[in-house]
Image: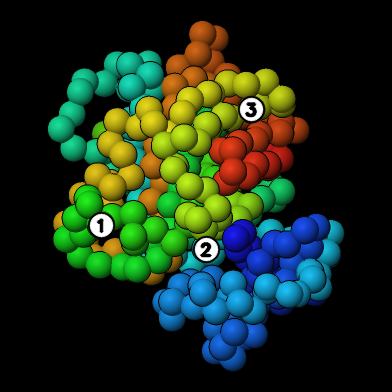
């Protein structure tokens, strides 16, 4: 099942993508549930399956604008240096624990929406990544049970302003400019994805493949990330973990390749979908 958050005629809604359209779920399963996060909090996924079983789509995709899958997560955790090829190209040493930094919700944007390059930086880089959305929150989650806490998967582009990222050893400033974190198009439920480690991941800039890997290449796999993060904080429903980018980032190429206005960037993760955005000047 593919869940989507969108705007239509000035209102925010959410629903299920079916065939070439959307079944609107806004306040349909429960009158108080008006978001994917609200749906997950009340554990209503099975009710959604029943609700949509014999329904045809009601809204054409052409009628909506995409929002980030979870527009208002309580927390967004990003994982750095989580593919061996990317770690090598940065010259970083092996570590025993994942590198974690944070994004803010207002730095995100949706599928087919502009991704904004700051006008004072020419070092705006792409980072295609798999995102996981937490369904059932918790603290001290074991690796054995971690995937039970995953509501679904999505594509993410951790757009990075590299000069600001390197002002200090902390990544946060270069990772939080407005509309630099595309997230979508959908939340795809685990039953539709299957074994996440079999997923391919690819980033294309203007049609050219610049990143290509498999999710089985993650240094710290998803269960380890969930267990580690839930040790230092309580994971909440709707929290997002962005699992890291493969090698091939623009900043480490010779010569470097950065995103510029007019570019089209795509993150393609097999069954999870293709996230597409257009670069414009902020």
Q: Are marks 1 and 3 in contact (CB under 8 Å)?
A: no
236 and 125: which is toward the camera = 236
Residue tagged 2:
70
Is 98 rendered above or below residue 133?
Answer: above
Q: CA distance from mark 1 to mark 3?
A: 34 Å
Please say whether residue 167 is visible from this viewpoint: no
**Of labels 1 and 3, the one closer to you:** 1
Viewed as shown, does residue 187 lie left or right of 236?
right
- The spot of residue 189 in percent (x, y) is 52, 58
Q: Residues within 10 Å of mark 1 (few under 14, many from 20)?
A: few
Residue tagged 1:
145
- The spot of residue 123 in percent (x, y) is 53, 27
Is 19 rendered above or below residue 31?
Answer: above
Q: CA distance from mark 3 to mark 2?
A: 24 Å
Residue tagged 3:
204
Toward the bottom, the furthest residue is: 31
- The spot of residue 73 in percent (x, y) is 44, 65
Q: SS of the residue at dot 3?
A: strand
Say which quadrant the N terminus sits in. Answer: bottom right
In terms of sequence position, does the residue under pointer 3 or pointer 2 come before the other?
2
Is 12 rendered above or below residue 240?
Answer: below
Q: SS of the residue at dot 2?
A: loop
Please say whether residue 33 is visible from this viewpoint: yes
In terms of sequence position, does the residue under pointer 1 or pointer 3 come before the other?
1
Residue drawn at point x = 75 percent, y = 33 percent = 262
Residue drawn at point x = 63 percent, y = 52 percent = 185
């Amino acid at each position: 099942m593919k869940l989507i958050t969108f705007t239509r005629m000035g209102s925010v809604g959410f629903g299920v993508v079916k065939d070439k359209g959307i079944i609107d779920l806004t306040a349909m399963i429960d009158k108080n549930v008006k978001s994917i996060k609200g749906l997950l909090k009340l554990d209503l996924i099975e009710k959604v399956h029943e609700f949509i079983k014999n329904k045809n789509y009601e809204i054409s995709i052409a009628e909506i604008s995409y929002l980030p899958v979870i527009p208002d997560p309580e927390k967004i955790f990003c994982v750095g240096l989580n593919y061996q090829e990317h770690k090598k190209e940065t010259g970083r040493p092996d570590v025993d624990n994942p590198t974690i930094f944070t994004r803010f919700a207002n730095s995100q944007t949706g599928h087919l929406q502009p991704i904004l390059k700051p006008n004072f930086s020419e070092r705006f880089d792409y980072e295609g990544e798999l995102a996981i959305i937490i369904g059932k929150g918790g603290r001290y989650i074991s690796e054995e049970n971690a995937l039970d806490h995953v509501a679904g998967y999505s594509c993410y582009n951790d757009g990075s302003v590299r000069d600001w990222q390197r002002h200090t050893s902390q990544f946060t400033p270069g990772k939080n400019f407005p509309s630099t974190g595309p997230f979508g198009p959908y939340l795809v439920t685990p039953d539709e994805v299957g074994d996440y480690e079999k997923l391919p991941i690819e980033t294309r800039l203007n049609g050219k493949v610049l990143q290509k890997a498999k999710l089985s290449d993650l240094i710290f796999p998803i269960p380890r990330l969930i267990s580690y993060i839930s040790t230092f904080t309580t994971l909440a429903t709707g929290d997002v973990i962005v699992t890291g980018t493969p090698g091939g980032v623009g900043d480490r190429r010779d010569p470097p390749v950065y995103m510029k206005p007019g570019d089209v960037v795509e993150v393609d993760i097999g069954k999870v979908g293709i996230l597409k955005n257009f670069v414009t000047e902020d």
